[in-house]
Amino acid sequence: MRNLTLAIEDELLTAARRVALESNTTVNQMVREFLSERVRERDLRSTARAALERSFDEIQIQVGTPSWTRDELHER
């Protein structure tokens, strides 16, 4: 595990320490969980996007040959 130095406002750190204390955890653990969740969300979006693209690739629509011309459709 690597160490990381963050610069945050004093008020934010104080509030984060209170939340951590109330949650029986540490600010360090809160940051790890936050970052893990962001990475997980990105991975889920990427997986969902790939599945959606595969679904679109699998859809095939048979249209046939049109019996009309563009000019016939747009007669004025």
Image (spheres, rainbow, N blue to C red):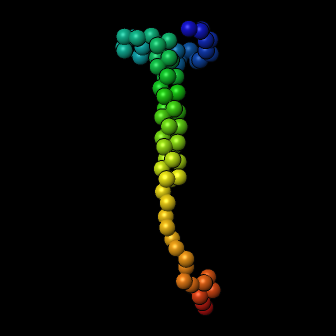
Q: Quadrant of residue 22?
A: top left
Compared across the picture, whether 21 is left or right of 5 comes to left
**Residue 37 image offset from top left, x and y in percent:** 47, 26
| 64 over 57 or under it: above or below | below
**Would you place residue 56 above or below residue 4 in this image?**
below
Identity of the residue drawn at 50% across and 17% down: 32
Of the pair 50 and 45, the residue shown nearer to us: 50
Residue 44 lies, with reference to residue 60, above or below; the image says above
Residue with the most extreme bottom position: 76
The N terminus: image quadrant: top right
Residue 17 in sight: no
At x 48% / y 50%, what residue is drawn?
55
Rendering coords of residue 5 (x, y %): 62, 11
Which quadrant is home to the C terminus? bottom right
Q: Which residue is drawn at 52% across and 22% down?
A: 35
Residue 29 percent location from the top left of the image: 46, 13
Q: Which residue is drawn at 53% across and 52% down?
A: 57
Q: How many labels does the image show?
A: 0
Q: Which of 6 and 68 is in front in this view?
A: 68
Residue 25 x, y percent position in the rendering: 40, 11
Q: Residue 9 is drawn in which quadrant?
A: top right
Q: Can residue 7 be seen in this view?
A: yes
Is 35 drawn above or below residue 53 in the view shown?
above
